RNA sequence: UGGGGCGUAGCCAAGUGGUAAGGCAACGGGUUUUGAUCCCGUGAAUCGCAGGUUCGAAUCCUGCCGCCCCAGCCA
């Protein structure tokens, strides 16, 4: 951290604890429940948990918070591990599960009963809800609240042994049914669930609740700072209550921060799985989703995600961050590392009428305009070329400095050409441009020093590689789709457009998942699922900034 | 109408009694064989509102307003 940066409020607390000698080492944990895929909101938590430990020489546990079997699965465990690694973080040998502590948790529950601060309730779920009261009215004590320690011990043991059906009994903390904090109205500690567990198998038929298991797991692992999101703030008194009652060796401290919400996206696990199950998107790693796996498949580099959450900051204020902020981070890192290539997304044929029909020249092209280390490559240039349909306009405004009838434009790394004739089909669509090239203007070696205002990209027809390119846009047309009653109503019908593109030949050899820049268009990467050697499929990661498009849009608005 | 949290520019965010950093976005200009990048510059904040304390308040006090979270045997 440089001197000009200020520490967020959590880092202030943590660094103070180090300086005051309260702790010699910082220990944190990232505790996802393996019941879904990680998303951009988790990136924030991961970077905070792992980041603050790493920068202070501390440690971080990756703990799978698996206290609710039936919703959790090893598939999600693997996806989570994969995502955290990909983001650039390492938990070493500190991969744990809440279920690793089920034995100790069970013993501690007995201790609570013996202390008289926990009891077995035999009300039904509906009755418990009625007894709980409301936000403005206190709850009432359960008729089973005053069972003897012996009876509670016996009942709890029999719960453990599987003597009762699901829901028949419930172990509860004995706190205060009149507390204004709903979480303190005798919260559940253990419930009966006759289902196997993703990690513990069929050993248990009673499972601990989050509030009970989480704080104690923190204590067992020697977590010094247990960082979580704001909605757990009013669980903190309960978190502390369990620690007070059981006095574990280590005393973790819970600190809450606000979630990171991204505009035009949804991060509720429930809604995310609806999108997947309804087929609105193809899978959990659909490139339009804000899941980590989706963003990876989309081609977002992990460094961009890290930079993004750093810019967003850690506070307690609700935030809804503009999509552009993320995209800027993606462009920032890709701009430096992505090799440049040429590709035409919507091809329009150009015939150079004065260029020899059988001639092919190899044009040298820089792989990165600002970094010679990327080297150069050769592009075949010939009589027939593809250019972008958007780069030609028949009735062009004065400020349009691409191709227009009678106008000139430079072909990137090639020659200056002039549009002599526009060929149309029966419907009046422009299907071909007949142009002439100026032999004196060959890139780099031309004898002519004349300049033209525009430069456009192209691909030689006879050498082009066909490819499918997927153009992604935001999944929703509403900035905060999570706040809309039915998100189906605000889906963007144009979130995916598929085009048949023509690529420069070198792209056929491009291997791996790293992104390249298609000059003047954006950053693209091979799709990790559908790409094949004989049928390339590229995803558009993000467009380049486009001030022309902005001008056009502004003009339309007038 | 209970409890908890939060209100500084379009979006983030510093600032904790001495006269409002920074980033993103926007706008203008320069460079450019990517309308990209890069560079330079500009505008934009009655610090949620109203009172009060003080020589001085975004910072302290009081009252109000707005937004978010909590009534799972979910996490």
Image (tube, rainbow, N blue to C red):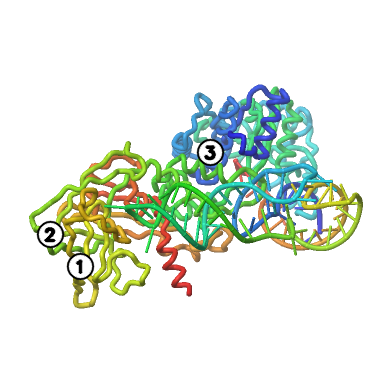
Position of residue A233 measured from the top left corner of the image (x, y, whole percent) = 70, 43
Chain at numbered mark 3:
A
Q: Residue at x 32, y 59 (%)?
A: A498
Position of residue A141 measured from the top left corner of the image (x, y, whole percent) = 80, 45
> Real-space Cα distance between discs 1 and 3?
69 Å
Sequence-first disc among 1 and 3: 3
Sequence-first disc among 1 and 2: 2
Nearer to me, A93 or A66: A93
Q: Residues within 10 Å of mark 3 (few under 14, many from 20)?
A: some
Position of residue A454 measured from the top left corner of the image (x, y, whole percent) = 31, 60
Q: Residue at x 42, y 64 (%)?
A: A493
Q: Quarter-wise, where is residue A96 in the image?
A: top right
Instruction: Describe the element under mark 2 as helix, strand or loop.
Output: loop
Instruction: Describe the element under mark 1 as helix, strand or loop.
Output: strand
Task: Please state if A533 lies on the left or on the right of A528 as rendered.
Answer: left
Q: Residue at x 33, y 47 (%)?
A: A527
Position of residue A553 measured from the top left corner of the image (x, y, whole percent) = 44, 68
Chain at numbered mark 1:
A
Chain at numbered mark 2:
A
Q: Residues within 10 Å of mark 2 (few under 14, many from 20)?
A: some
Dot label at residue A355: 2
Quarter containing the N terminus of chain A: top right
Above or below, A95 relative to A359? above
Dot label at residue A195: 3
Dot label at residue A433: 1
């Amino acid at each position: 951290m440089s001197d000009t940066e200020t520490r967020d409020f959590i880092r202030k607390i943590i660094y103070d604890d180090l300086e005051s000698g309260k702790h010699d080492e910082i220990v944190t944990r990232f505790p996802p429940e393996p019941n879904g895929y990680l998303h951009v909101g988790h990136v924030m938590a991961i970077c905070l948990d792992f980041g603050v430990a790493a920068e202070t020489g501390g440690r971080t546990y990756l703990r799978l918070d698996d206290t609710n079997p039936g919703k959790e699965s090893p598939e999600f465990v693997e996806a989570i591990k994969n995502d955290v690694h990909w983001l650039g973080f390492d938990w070493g040998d500190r991969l744990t599960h809440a279920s690793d502590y089920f034995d100790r948790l069970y013993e501690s529950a007995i201790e609570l009963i013996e202390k008289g601060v926990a009891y077995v309730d035999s009300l039904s779920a509906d009755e418990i809800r009625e007894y709980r009261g409301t936000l403005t009215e206190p709850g009432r004590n359960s008729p089973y609240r005053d069972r003897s320690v012996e009876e509670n011990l016996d009942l709890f043991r029999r719960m453990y042994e599987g003597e009762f059906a699901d829901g028949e009994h419930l172990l509860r903390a004995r706190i205060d049914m009149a507390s204004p904090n709903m979480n303190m109205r005798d919260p559940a500690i253990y419930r009966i669930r006759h289902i196997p567990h993703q990690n513990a198998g069929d050993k248990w038929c009673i499972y601990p609740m989050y509030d009970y298991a989480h704080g104690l797991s923190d204590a067992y692992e020697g977590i010094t700072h247990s960082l979580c999101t704001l909605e757990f703030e009013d669980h903190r008194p309960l978190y502390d209550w369990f620690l007070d009652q059981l006095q574990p060796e280590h005393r973790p401290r819970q600190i809450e921060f606000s979630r990171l919400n991204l505009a035009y996206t949804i991060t509720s696990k429930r809604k995310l799985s609806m999108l997947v199950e309804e087929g609105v998107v193809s899978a959990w790693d659909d490139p339009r989703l804000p899941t980590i796996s989706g963003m990876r498949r989309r081609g977002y580099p992990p460094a961009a995600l890290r930079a993004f959450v750093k810019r967003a900051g850690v506070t307690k204020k609700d935030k809804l961050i503009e999509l552009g902020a993320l995209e800027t981070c993606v462009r920032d890192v890709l701009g430096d590392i992505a090799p440049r290539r040429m590709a035409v997304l919507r091809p329009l044929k150009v015939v150079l009428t004065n260029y020899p029909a059988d001639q092919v020249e190899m044009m040298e092209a820089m792989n990165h305009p600002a970094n010679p280390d990327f080297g150069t490559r050769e592009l075949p240039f010939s009589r027939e070329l593809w250019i972008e349909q958007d780069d030609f306009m028949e009735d062009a405004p004065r400020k349009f400095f691409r191709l227009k009838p009678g106008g000139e434009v430079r072909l990137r790394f090639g020659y200056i050409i002039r549009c002599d004739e526009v060929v149309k089909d029966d419907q009046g669509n422009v299907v071909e441009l007949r142009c002439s090239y100026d032999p004196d203007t060959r890139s780099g070696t031309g004898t002519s020093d004349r300049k033209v205002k525009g430069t456009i990209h192209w691909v030689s027809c006879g050498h082009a590689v066909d490819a499918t390119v997927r153009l992604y846009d935001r999944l929703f047309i509403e900035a905060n789709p999570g706040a809309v009653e039915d998100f189906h109503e605000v889906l963007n019908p144009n979130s995916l457009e598929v085009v048949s593109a023509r690529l420069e030949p070198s792209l056929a050899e491009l291997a791996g998942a790293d992104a390249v820049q298609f000059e003047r268009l954006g950053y693209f990467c091979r799709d990790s699922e559908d790409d094949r050697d004989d049928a390339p499929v590229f995803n558009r990661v993000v467009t380049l900034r486009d001030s022309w498009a902005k001008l056009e849009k502004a003009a339309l608005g007038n």
